[in-house]
Image: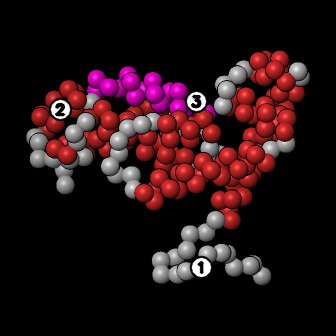
């Protein structure tokens, strides 16, 4: 149910409560979207504004938090439609500690299961690929620093990282292809064999 505020009041509220946070949300998004080429920062911000504009403003207690949560949801929706998911982006979305009453336990559990699946896949990587990947993604070292630490050439690090990303991408995609959500009212827990 939309707010009964007249257009002028809504504009003033938006200018006072939302627009001052645009620079902060843009900075946050710029860091999080760096591994997601197909997700445009301007489009995310505009979509967040559109959703905020159509929301019931009387129910928004913290416009800044609502703006960040809305932007996070838009990025999450984009990620769910994407085939390749940036590990950094998924981790960043998990770390964003903004209270969101709309996120239900099922969605949180699903996200936690995705992160756990990703960690299992990383453990399956060949040792050198795993080491290079972890140094790059978790310790945020440059390729040059990784090469020095591992005692290999930068081109070797690049090959390890490419192999790791291909492996993770393939495993994530195959897991998606194998997953099946049972229809409402059914208790099927596995796919039927194809004939």
Q: Quadrant of the C terminus?
A: bottom right
Number of residues whose C-alpha sits closer than 10 Å to that of mark 2, classed few (under 14), some (14–19) or many (20 or more): some
Place of residue 86 in the rendered image (x, y in percent of width and height, measured from the top left): 62, 39
Helix, strand or loop status at disc 1: loop
Residue 120 seen in render: yes
Residue positioned 35% across, 45% down in the render = 100
Q: Residue at x 59, y 52 (%)?
A: 114
Predominant SS of the magenta segment: helix
Q: Earlier in the sequence, mark 1 or mark 3?
A: 3
Q: Is residue 6 above or below residue 186?
A: above
Q: Which residue is the site of mark 3? A: 34
Q: Position of residue 45 (x, y in %)?
A: 39, 34
Q: Residue at x 75, y 78 (%)?
A: 194
**Which numbered dot is residue 13?**
2
- The range drawn in magenta is 19-38
Q: Which mark is residue 188?
A: 1
As measured in the structure, the alpha-carbon distance from the residue carrying label 1 to the one carrying label 3 is 39 Å
Pick the residue in front: 33 or 117. Answer: 117
* Residue 35 appears left or right of 111: right
Query: Per the image, is 33 magenta?
Result: yes
Identify the image quadrant of residue 27: top left
Marks 2 and 3, Cα distance to the nearest angstrom? Answer: 31 Å
């Amino acid at each position: 149910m939309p707010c009964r505020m007249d257009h002028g009041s809504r504009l003033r509220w938006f200018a006072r409560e939302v627009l001052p946070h645009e620079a902060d949300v843009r900075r946050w998004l710029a860091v999080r979207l760096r591994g997601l080429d197909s997700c445009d920062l301007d489009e995310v911000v505009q979509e967040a504004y559109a959703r905020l504009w159509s929301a019931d403003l009387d129910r928004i207690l913290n416009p800044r938090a609502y703006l960040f949560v809305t932007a996070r949801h838009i990025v999450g929706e984009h990620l769910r439609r994407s085939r390749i998911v940036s590990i950094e982006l998924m981790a960043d979305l998990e770390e964003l500690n903004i209270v969101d009453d709309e996120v239900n336990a099922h969605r949180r559990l699903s996200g936690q299961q995705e992160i756990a699946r990703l960690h299992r896949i990383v453990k399956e990587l060949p040792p050198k690929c795993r080491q290079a990947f972890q140094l790059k993604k978790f310790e945020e070292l440059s390729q040059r620093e990784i090469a020095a630490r591992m005692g290999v050439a930068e081109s070797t690090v690049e090959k390890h990282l490419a192999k790791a990303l291909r492996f993770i991408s393939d495993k994530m995609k195959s897991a998606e292809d194998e997953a099946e959500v049972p229809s409402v009212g059914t208790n099927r827990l596995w796919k039927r064999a194809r004939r």
